[in-house]
Structure formats: structure tokens, C-alpha cells
Amino acid sequence: MTNEPSGATGPVALDREGRWLGLRPVTLLMLVAIGVLLIPLSVLSQPADSSSPGGLLAQMRAEEGLSQANLGEIDPTSETMRLATLGLKNVAVTLLWDRANYYKKVEDWTNLSATLEQMTKLQPNFYSVWDFQAHNLSYNISVEFDDYHDRYAWVIKGIEFLRDGIFLNTREARLLGRMGWFIGQKIGKADEKLQYRRLFKQDDDFHERDRPGRTLPERDNWLVGREKYISGQELVDSGAPLKTTPLIFHSEPMMTAINYSRALEDEGVFGEQGRNAWTLAGDEMRRYSVRDIPTTWDLPIRLGLEEEMRQQSERLADELEELLPGRYAELGERLRAALPAEEQAALDAPNDGAIRRAAAAGLRGRAEDNRHMANGGPRGTSRATRKGGATRPRLSRSLRNGPDHSSLPRHRELRLLAGFLRGRHH
């Protein structure tokens, strides 16, 4: 006859400590709770497909534009690698960044390229990965080679790296801007710019990948860079978020057109082509002047409407003066009295175009002097002086040579304005 343990109630029995199948009651309750929570979790996280919008999380991602389909093209390899990390993606990326820096240090370019590709697979939608590593390829690694053909190859490698990022981030206007910057600035302003610009025009493989059918005159690096900036502007105008300074971002097509015109002049290209280049720069400047630039005040501005806005401001000031006689002027005087003496003098100075142009010329001369001092030269000598030309005039001298500066009180005000502008500049 078999003796069953005390407390047995069937084929499955509890031991003396109340355990069931060796599990404590608290553990059993936790397992039951996990099983119950899996039901709402599976409902919330249902992926979207062609017949269903998916669960709540998938719908929220779609509304905020955060799903992979909204961010760019879906890379199955990237998705598989991220799942394979089992939640340790950030740790893996940190290790890969460290390996990339090591391979760069030891000049192991093959392993560096492989590591960068792995990084982009794990973080395809992280802007800094594409920006930093593309800069690393085009600027830092390219200079490690002696032959300019090899340097150019690595510059293009960085640009192609950005192209891959744009493919996976079709709503990221900054990547288009960076690609335009690399094509324009790196190829057009490097020490090897003559060789780079020539190689870029002859690079059939690049232009066939970028825009098939591009003619030889259109293959100028500045014009291609301008195309990228305009594509970025069109993307922003379509509703894509712009996560950088709009004032600078939207000025790049204009600046690229100006650099294109200057490059032609430096290469001795004049005539109709030169006139067309400066006409293009003027058109871009006018287009920039009428573009709405977002501000932190939630009020867009247009740089070309300064005169109109000044007239509107004066009209509103007159209306306030009529509504509150004397109060508006009293408020202005009180605010003026709270300013430092130099700023008060600057407000009293004449506000004509000649003064502003002279002040701007003086500030450029001062910046040139500061750059020359940083290189070990004496103050007061500019680039023109180092090349045998005349010294750029300083701000006070520019103002003294302006119109109607003979009277002593006016001259003193202008000198105060000069000091104020210098302090603002620094």
C-alpha cells in the first residue's frame, strides 16, 4: 500500500512549502500576469499592412510620421540586424563607433568601410551617423592620400555615403543640404579644386547615378550642389520638417550660384557664360529675398521687404501716437535711457545706406585683420597687403571718408557707432 504525502489532493500535489511543480505562489502569479498582459500588448503592437491600419502603436507612428515607411525606404537587412541585437542595438553601435575610430587611426580603410556600413544598418534613421561619417570620408580620410585621384575618390565616397542616407531618409532635408555642401565646398574650394572640378565634370559614373542626361556645362560642381539645395527646399516646402536654421539653409542656393560665378571668373571664363552665371546669382538672390523665413516668434519674415516693413512700423507708431498722445514717445524715451551710452549714440547716428556699407566694409576688414593676426601677422594688414596690394581700410577710416562727415559732433557720433559695431561683432 502506497503512502501519499500529507496534503495531497490528486495526481499533482503541493509540497510542504506550498509549491506547485517546484514554483512558489508568487512566481505563479507573476507568470499568470505576464500571460494576461501579452494579450493587450499583442493587440497594441499589431503591425500595419495593406488591409489593416494595425494596432494603436502602429497608428500613432503613422500619424506622427515615425514609421519606417514614412522615414524612407525599408531595408530588410537593416531590420533583421536590429532585431538580432535583442534590444542591445545601442551597445552594438557604441562598439562600432569605437572600431571605426580605431580603423581610421591605423589606416585600415577596408575594415573602416565595412564598419560604417554596419553602423548605418543599425541606425539608418540617425542623421548624425550619415553626416559625421560622410564628413569623415570626404574631409579627414581623403587627405591621407598623396595622389589627388585617390583623394577625389574618397571625396566622392563620402558624397555617395550621403546618397545612401537620403535613400533611407527621404524626409530629411538636411542630408540633401549636406550633399550640396560637399559637392560645392569640398570640390570647389579645396586646395586641389582645379583638379577636383575637372575630375568631377569627367565623372560619368557619378552623374549617371545622380541625374542621367546631365550635359557637360551642367556638370559644374557648384551647379550640381545648387540642385541638391533646391531639392532640399522643395522637400521642406512639401511639409518635411527642417531641423536646422532656415535663414542659412535657404540662403545656400544663392551662395552656391555666387560661388559658381566667382569660380568662372577665377578660371578666366567671361563673356556670355559669365554674364549668365551672375544673372543666375541675381535670380537666386531675388528668390531668397521673397521667401518666407520661419522665426522663433512664429511669424515668418521676408528679407526683401525691409523698406515695406519699416513704413508699416512708422504707420503703426503714428497710429499709437494718435491713440495715446505722448505716451508712446515717453515709453520710447524711457527705453532709450536704459541703454548704454554707446548704443544711444548708435541710435542717434544717421541711418543711411552709405554708413551701413562703410560699417560692413570696416567689419570685414577687421575680421581679415584678426585672421591675419591668428597666422602671426601684425594688426592692420589684410590679405591684399600680404599679396602686395593696398591695406583694407579700418572702420573709422571708412566712416571718415563717407559723405558729410566734416562736422566734429557728427564725426564723434560716427566714431561711437564704430566702437559699438566692433563690440557687437566680437
Image (cartoon, rainbow, N blue to C red):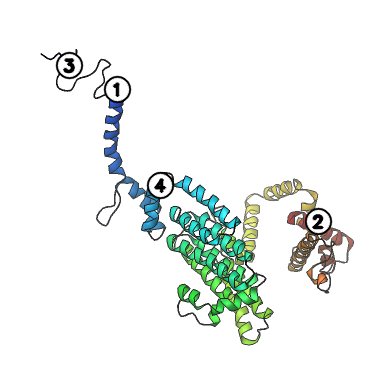
Amino acid at the residue labelled 4: Thr
SS for dot 4: loop
In this rendering, the label closer to the viewer, 3 or 1:
3
Q: Earlier in the sequence, mark 2 or mark 4?
A: 4
Residue of label 4? 85
Residue of label 2? 419
CB atoms at circles 2 and 4 under 8 Å apart?
no
The reply to whether residue 301 is visible in this rendering is: no
Marker disc for residue 24: 1
SS for dot 1: loop
Amino acid at the residue labelled 3: Ala
In this rendering, the label closer to the viewer, 2 or 4:
4
Q: CA distance from mark 3 to mark 2?
A: 97 Å
Q: Earlier in the sequence, mark 3 or mark 4?
A: 3
Q: CA distance from mark 3 to mark 4?
A: 46 Å
Q: Earlier in the sequence, mark 3 or mark 1?
A: 3
Q: CA distance from mark 2 to mark 1?
A: 81 Å
Q: CA distance from mark 2 to mark 4?
A: 60 Å
Tell me what residue is drawn at x 58 percent, y 77 percent.
199
Q: CA distance from mark 4 to mark 1?
A: 32 Å
Amino acid at the residue labelled 1: Arg
Residue 167 position by quadrant: bottom left
CB atoms at circles 2 and 1 under 8 Å apart?
no
Residue of label 3? 8
Residue 290 placement (x, y as % from top left): 56, 68
Q: Nearer the viewer, residue 293 or 109?
A: 109
SS for dot 2: helix
Residue 90 placement (x, y as % from top left): 47, 46
